[in-house]
Image (tube, rainbow, N blue to C red):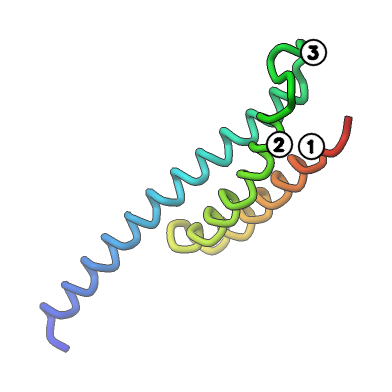
């Protein structure tokens, strides 16, 4: 391969990495929104905020694919030493959201 091929491959890799980073950021923000909804629904003492519990249920269920997509795209964006810690935090956080769903 000559230099132009290497440069084109490098540019493609960076464009792909930036795109994956945007997907990772959006899904991580969506996971944070789901976590906020679960916790605010669970902590609230006013029954009018979530009378039927749909916000609690749907946010818990939607947090699982959001955490999975974030965990899959995260290694392409951040260094390896941070990836293991962030993935562990995501999955433990999702497990805590399920605990919040099933406890009363």
Decide which of 86, 61 is in the foreground and name it. Answer: 61
Q: Which mark is residue 57?
A: 2
Q: Which mark is residue 12?
A: none
Q: Quadrant of the C terminus?
A: top right
Q: Quadrant of the N terminus?
A: bottom left
User: Which residue is disc 1 drawn over?
Assistant: 101
Disc 2 residue crowd, few under 14, some 14–19, many 20+, Cα 10 Å: some
Element type where label 1 sits in the image = helix
Considering only vertical position in the picture, is 13 above or below 51?
below
Q: Earlier in the sequence, mark 2 or mark 3?
A: 3
Q: Which mark is residue 45?
A: 3
Q: Quadrant of residue 44?
A: top right
Residue drawn at the location 19% of the way across and 78% of the way down: 6
Residue 85 position within the rendered picture, expressed as x and y whole percent measured from the top left: 64, 54
Considering only vertical position in the picture, is 90 above or below 36?
below
Residue 99 position within the rendered picture, expressed as x and y whole percent measured from the top left: 82, 41
Circles 2 and 1: CB atoms closer than 8 Å: yes
Q: Disc 1 and disc 3: Cα gap in Å?
A: 15 Å
Q: Quadrant of residue 9?
A: bottom left
Considering only vertical position in the picture, is 37 above or below 61?
above
């Amino acid at each position: 391969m000559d230099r132009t091929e290497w440069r084109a491959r490098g540019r493609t890799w960076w464009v792909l990495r930036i795109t994956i980073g945007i997907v990772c950021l959006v899904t991580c923000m969506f996971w944070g929104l789901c976590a906020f909804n679960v916790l605010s629904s669970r902590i609230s003492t006013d029954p009018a905020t979530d009378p039927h519990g749909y916000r609690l249920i749907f946010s818990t269920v939607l947090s699982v694919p959001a955490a999975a997509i974030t965990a899959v795209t995260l290694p392409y964006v951040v260094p390896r030493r941070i990836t293991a810690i962030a993935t562990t935090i995501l999955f433990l956080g999702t497990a805590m959201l399920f605990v919040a769903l099933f406890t009363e």
